[in-house]
Amino acid sequence: MAFMGSGLRIQGDDNLQSMLIGTVMRKIKSRTWKKQRYFKLQDDCMTIWYKSKKAGKAHSTFSVSDVEAVREGHQSEVLLSIADEFPADRCFTLVFRGRKGNLDLVAESADEAHTWISGMKKLIENLENMGEREKLDQWIGDWFKKADKNNDGRMNFKEVRDLLKMMNVDMNEHHAHRLFTMADKSQTDALEDDEFVLFYKMLTQREDVLRVFQEFSADGQKLSESDLEDFLKQEQLEGEDIQQHAKQLIESYEPSDTAKQLNAMTFDGFLMYLGSAEGSIFNPQCRAVYQDLSQPLCHYFISSSHNTYLMEDQLRGQSSVEGYIRALTRGCRCVEVDCWDGANGEPIVYHGHTFTSKILFKDVVNAVGNYSFKVSEYPVILSIENHCSVEQQRVMAQHLSHILGDKLLKSTLDGHSPIMLPSPEDLKGKILLKAKKIGGLEENINGMVDDSMTTEVSDEDEGAEIDDDNLHRESIIRRVKRSKQRLSKELSDCVVYCKSVHFNSFKHSRIHSKFYEVASFTESKARKQLREAGAEFVHHNSRQLTRIYPSGFRTDSSNFNPQEMWNAGCQIVALNFQTAGEGMDLNDGLFSQNGRSGYILKPSFMRDADQIFDPETPQKQDGHQPCILTIQVISGQQFPKVNIKEGSIVDPLVRVEIHGIPMDQAKQETRYIENNGFNPVWYDTLRFTIHTPELAMVRFVVEDYDKTSKNDFVGQYTLPLSCMQQGYRHIHLLSKDGTSIPPSSLFVHIRITGLK
C-alpha cells in the first residue's frame, strides 16, 4: 500500500531488514519461565508479530507506537535474576507506555540483540519524527489492515461494512454503498490503495472545520495570508507577530506547493494546522521550562509518589524496582522507600505487615541513581519510612553514599547555616533524603551532635496512622506501636534540608518549627486542618514543606483528589502512581507543563507570607479576579470502541470538570449522541465562573452513555486553565492509563473572559 509505513525509511537499514525476516528469542518472565518465541517485524514497519515455536496458529502482536523505550542489558528485575545464565549483551527490555508490563527478551547472540535494540530505537525515532500527513497515512494504513480480512490488498463492500462497525460508525447501507461506489474509480467492486484513501477522506469529511474555514476565506477556496492573520487575531486571540506566525503556519502545514507559492493555505493545510500541537488546546509555550525555578523548594508543587515500590494493591501486590523507574521517568520528584530489616544484614523494602513481596534497599538506590535525572534535571527527594535497626540503618547509609556518590546531598550547599530552603535550580542533579534526624541543621554544621541521641524512628508508619474516629476499623490494618529507638548517626547525617517531624499545631509551628522540617499528614488529617484553618495551612506551606499521603484504608491503592491539597499549598502530595483514574489524571495534567520538570511554581498569593489566602473564601483575597470560561464542544473524532459486544457503537457525551478551590468545583455535560463514536457533532456550550483561575484544572471526559448502567469511560484530557489556548482547538484524548489514543480527539472553541 502506498500509504502504509510511508514515514519509515527502511531501505539500506540492515537492522530493519533483518527484523523483517525475523528471529527466535527467549521471552523471560522469571528465573524458571523462559520460552522461545519467533519475533518478526511486519511489512508495515509498525507492528511486531510473535508466536510460539510449536505448531499452531496462535500468535500475538504489539504496535511499535506502544513501546516507550528500549533498555539494554540486565535493566529489569527479571533479567537481573538470570544474569548468571545469560550475558548482558544478549539481553534487552521493551518498556511499554502506560501501565502495561515490560517484555524481557534474550537473543541467541549479541549481534542479534544489537540488531533488535538498534532497529527498535530507529522505529521509535521514526515514529516520533513523523509529520502530520505521515501520521494520517499511517492511521489509514492501520484501518486498511484491520479491514482487509482476506489479505488480498483490496477491500470489497462486505469488508467496508465490517470496517465501519470497527470504526464506531453507524451508517445506513445505502449511504455506505454510495461512498464505496464514488471511491471505486476503477469500477472493480473493490477498493485498493488510493481508492481507499479517497473513501477514508469522504468518511472523515470535517464539515465543522469547513464552516470555520469558509467564514474566514475571501473566495471560499483558500485562506490568503491576510485571511489567516484575521483568523489568528480574531479567533485564536494571538497578539504577537501574527504576520510572521501566519507565514510559518503556511510553511509548516500547507501540503500544496502551489498554495505555498501564493502564500495561501488550503482547507487541507488548515485542517493539518488545527490537528497539530500548535492547534491543540495546550499552549506549546508551557511545554518547556518557562517558570522561575530559583525560589525556595517550598514555593513549588512537587510531583510525588506514594508506596513507589508497589505495582498493584497495598496488601498482596508485587513490590518492584520497576515502580521507581516508572515514576522517575514520568517526572516524579519525590519517591517513597519503606525500609525494614532483611536477611543477611541487608535492609529490604516492602509494605510492612502485609503480604506484598520484598525487594533489596540497595537495588532501589541503584534504580534511583540510574533514573532520577533522565527526564528532569531537578532534585529528587527520597522519602524514607525507617523501621530498621541501628545496624541496618548504617548499611542503608553506606549504600546511599557508595551508590549515589556526589548525587547525594550530605551538607548544606555553602557549608553555612542557611535561613531558608534552597531552590530546585540550586539543587539540580541532587538527591535529598527526607527522614528523621538527630538534632537540627544548626547543630550538625557546628558539630554539636553526638551519636547517642535517640529519636522516634518511624516517620509516618501508615499502620499507626488510623484516625481516632475510625478505631472500629482497626482490624483492617495492624496497629503498630511506635517505639523510641536509636537512630544511626550515619543515616541521620544524610538528612539535610528535609527533616521529618511530627506535626503539633500551626501555632506551635509558627513559633518553634524550622524551615527544613517536613510534617506528613494522612489525607483525612489534612482535610481536618483545611476545614478548621485553611488560611493558616496556606501560610505554613509558604515557609516549609508538607507531605500528604493516602489513608491506610485505601488497600486497593486508590487515590484521593490531590486538588484539595494543592488548594492549601501542600507541595508533596503523594499519589499511587500505579493506579489510573481521576487523581493521576489531575497529577499528570498539572505536571505536564514546565518541561515535565516535576516542579510547578505556586501562585504568588501562596508564596508570600504577608498575604492571606483562604481557599474557602477566595473573594477576600487582595486583587481577587474571577473569570468566565466558555467552552463550546463542537465535535468528536474517531473515539475508540469501548464495548466489545458485536455491533455495539458508542453513544458519546462530553463532561467538562473544573477542579479547583471548593467554590470553583463544577461539572457540566453535553447531550449524548446516539450511535456515533466516529464523528459526533454537538455545538453545545458550557459556561463556568472561576474565582481562583491560578489553581484551576480543567478535565475533559468522554463517556459512552448507558441509560441502564454506569457510563463507560472512553477518553480524557486534563490541563491547567493557565496553559489553555483560546479559540478553535483540538483536544487529543488520552486513555485511562494516560497514553495517547490517536486519532481520537474533540474539537472545541474556548473563551476566557473577565467578569463584567
Image: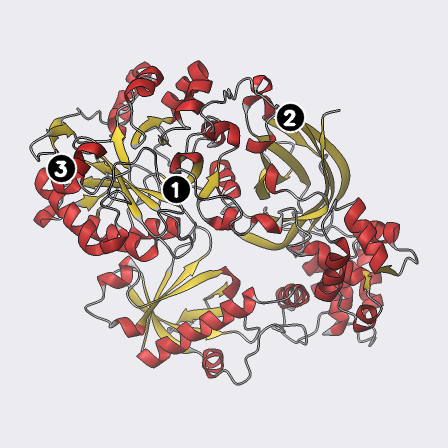
Establish if 258 lies above or below 31: below
Secondary structure type for disc 3: loop
* Quadrant where the image shows the C terminus: top right
The residue at 11%/29% (across/down) is 454
Dot in front, 2 or 3: 3
Q: For mark 1, what is the residue?
A: 423
**Kind of residue at badge 1:** Ser
**Kind of residue at badge 3:** Gly
Q: For mark 2, what is the residue?
A: 625
- Comparing 656 with 711, the one in front is 656
Q: Earlier in the sequence, mark 2 or mark 3?
A: 3
- Horizontal and vertical percent position of residue 493: 17, 41
- Mark 1–mark 2 Cα distance, whole angstroms, equals 29 Å
- Horizontal and vertical percent position of residue 19: 46, 78
* Classed neighbour count for the residue bearing mark 2: other residues with Cα under 10 Å, few (<14), some (14–19), many (≥20): some
Q: Earlier in the sequence, mark 1 or mark 2?
A: 1
* Quadrant where the image shows the N terminus: bottom right
Is residue 206 found left or right of 276 in the rendered image?
right
Marks 1 and 2 in Cβ contact (< 8 Å):
no
Q: For mark 3, what is the residue?
A: 447
The residue at 68%/59% (across/down) is 162
